[in-house]
Amino acid sequence: MDEKKKVAAPAPKNAFMTFVFENMGILAALVVLCLILGIFPGTSEYFVTVKNLFNVLRQISTNLLLACGMTMVIILGGIDLSVGSVIALSGVLAAGGVVRYNLPIVPAMLLGVLIGIIFGLFNGFVISKTTIPPFIVTLATMNIARGLAGVYTGGSPVRVVTKEWQWIGAGYVAGVPVPVIIMIIVFIVSLLIINRTKMGRYIYAVGGNNLAATYSGINVSTVKFFVYTYSGIMAGIAGIILASRMYSGQPTAGEGAEMDAIAAVVVGGTSMAGGSGKLGGTLIGALIIGILNNGLNLMNVNSFWQTVVKGIVILLAVTIDFFRNRKK
Amino acid sequence: MSDNIILRMKKITKTFPGVKALSDVDLELNEGEVHALLGENGAGKSTLIKVLGGIYHADSGEIEINGKNVKINSVQDAEANGIAIIHQELVLVPYMSAAENIFLGRELGAGITVNLKAQEKEAQAVLDRLGMDIDARSLVKDLSIAKQQMVEITKAVATNSRILVMDEPTSSISEKEVDNLFKIMRDLTSHGVGIIYISHKMSELQEICDRVTVMRDGEYVGTKVVKETSRDDLIAMMVGRQLTSYYERDFLEPGEEVLRVENINDNKRVFNVSFNLKKGEIVGFAGLVGAGRSETMQAIFGLTKGSTGDVYINGKKVDIKSPIDAMKNGLVMVPESRKEQGLYLIQDVRYNTTIEILDQFIKNLNVNTKKETEVTQKYIDMMSTKTPSQQQIIGNLSGGNQQKVLIGRWLATDPQILILDEPTRGIDVGAKAEIYAIMNNLLKQGVSIIMISSEMPEIINMSDRVYVMAEGKIAGCIDHEEISQEAIMKLAAV
């Protein structure tokens, strides 16, 4: 009787409440963070403006894009270290497309996305066809992409100074920054893939128990292919957004971006062991990191200290997770 | 059961690098039949099933279903041919609900989408119909092992397959659930489903199975009607000979006391344990799981921090703070769980044999490979370990052969006292008999043995004396003449 009760206990009333319940810890952290910044005398008058809200969202947009792909990769039990470097390569090739080959803006930017797809496909191919750990494979492609970006540019930025170029990174639609719109669309698409498609279920299955997936007739290779390619596309899109906002493709763009994405995913409660995690958690994780940066900026905390604080927050988040899991 | 053959596997052969896992194996399954597949560990049963399930590809051989030749190259092919398999190892996804696991790989929903609500409803209906007390929404990781096994069974049954394979489905479920499983099986066979049933439990075969096919060393031995055969016949078919003296043991007059242990405490699971061991004796340690037997030996072996008590070897008090101290004093232990506590699974037989005696052939920077090979071969021969070569990765050997290598490793240190913690757990009858014979030989060479075992027949037939433990204390000591299951249980029960 007792056991039956225990099993029947987590009957979710609706998806939203379940989400709130499961992410109580980081949601509370987010709310507290916002309250402090909203009340703190030095920041309150600016923090709660619409302008700043969009500012924060725009700042986290590329990180959340990467984190959407990274969430799938980590649920799958893998890691994708190449995304930061792919940002750079995508950005410089898109910019180069305009400046060096006189391509129109749209095809040039698609070229950037294509780079993301190619790297994603390559990562997916090697990881699904061999047993080389994803960490090693993507460490290699990380270096290749970063190196190629440097080779292509000779180390200096490829400048593009047209209004159209800047639209995707710095433009607005009905007062909302374009990167924020892209972020929202990508987030919803990712959410649907993870929660509403068979592929989404397969990602959890492969990450949770590879053998079970195989024995259930799931094509594990296809799932890995899909996930790494998706992550690559995210990096490609993030690359052109950044290049657009900075008026140039820079070979140093996106340095450490893969780590910020991993941080958002982990702070959001996804286990590095694979098999479990929620995209909603990743959103909160990205928001916490973004708002923290924003708040520390408003408080004029120097950037080195900001990095220290970011590290502490990551450590806190995973420690809380550790104790919560241990209790279970 | 009718004589309508729904599955015929003919001359299936499968080779792995260095090992012929299956050679010309036949298997036939009738409509509505429960057909047992019997054989020792490593006989090739699971390999044969994996060929049928499309996980392995046979090198040669044919598979006929309903008289038609079919090719099974993938799990999908197997499913399309109406084959479902309950694998021996639990293959469920822990962070998914029971419903999601049941429909894994064949989700409900239009196109690329998945309909979780419909799956839950459907899965619950199947679970209820099968009499499983499980909420379809609960995550598999929150279910007990027995219930996970039930989910696994439900998953296979829910495919409505005509051919169902069950690889040791009762290994981790209770008697009540076994009864329920048998009820489900009878219901399925009455609807014409054919079931291939793999189990080591002879009593189950007699209860549920119609025919039995026996395999040995990757080869087909024969097929019998269960009612027309006996337990002894089947064992003889499995091991290839009549086991005349299963428990080989010459009881000799014990010599001097070699080990005396006084008041061992680890203050958690072991309280004031005292016992002794004489030369040429096997002293058994019986008791319920959790009685503190392994913990006692770990404390003596120097594995437990903060344990207290006195240990005398050959009458001299010794101070054992670590396994190294224990080994120096001629005391070694073969642990309970060979995979976790014993073997370096990805290393080869030679590495696993010689890891404790490296200083015998590594001097400064010089490695005497010839000596290493000789030593390894000595213990392979002594234990009659079946391995293709010394370079065979030990994880690829059967459980019995792994255990032999592990015992050999400790014998190589030339011990005078050998602690064996569950020496025959999870290994097949043939290898068991061999290990008993080896123990008997060791005694003649002057080694004394402490044997922890939860298998009553083993304790009763092999021990000179038996200490029974309960709740961390010695509950009593029984001499050879008085050892019986009743005597042990009387002391072991709390």
Image (cartoon, rainbow, N blue to C red):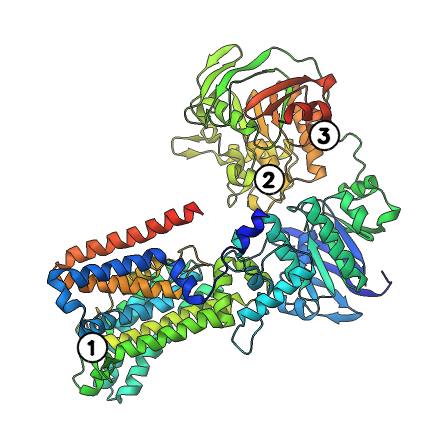
Determine the CA span between mark 3 and mark 1. 78 Å
Residue B481: which disc?
none
Q: Nearer the viewer, mark 1 or mark 2?
A: 1
Which comes sooner in the sequence, label 2 or label 3? 2
Mark 2, residue position? B402
Q: Position of residue B219 (x, y in %)?
A: 75, 51
Q: Are marks 1 and 2 on the same chain?
A: no
Q: Is residue B22 above or below residue B323?
A: below
Seen in the image, is A157 located left or right of residue B172?
left
Q: Residue at x 14, y 69 (%)?
A: A46
Amino acid residing under circle 1: Arg
Q: Position of residue B312 (x, y in %)?
A: 50, 13
Assign a secondary structure to mark 3.
helix
Residue B457: which disc?
3
Q: Nearer the viewer, residue B457 or B390?
A: B457
- Around disc 3, counting alpha carbons within 10 Å, would you say few (fewer than 14), some (14 to 19), or many (20 or more)? few
Q: Position of residue B488 (x, y in %)?
A: 68, 24
Q: Nearer the viewer, residue B326 or B95?
A: B95
Mark 1, residue position? A245
Residue B140, located in which quarter of the rendered image? bottom right
Residue B384, located in which quarter of the rendered image? top right
Assign a secondary structure to mark 2.
helix
Q: Nearer the viewer, residue B451 or A249?
A: B451
Q: Is residue A161 above or below residue A253?
A: below
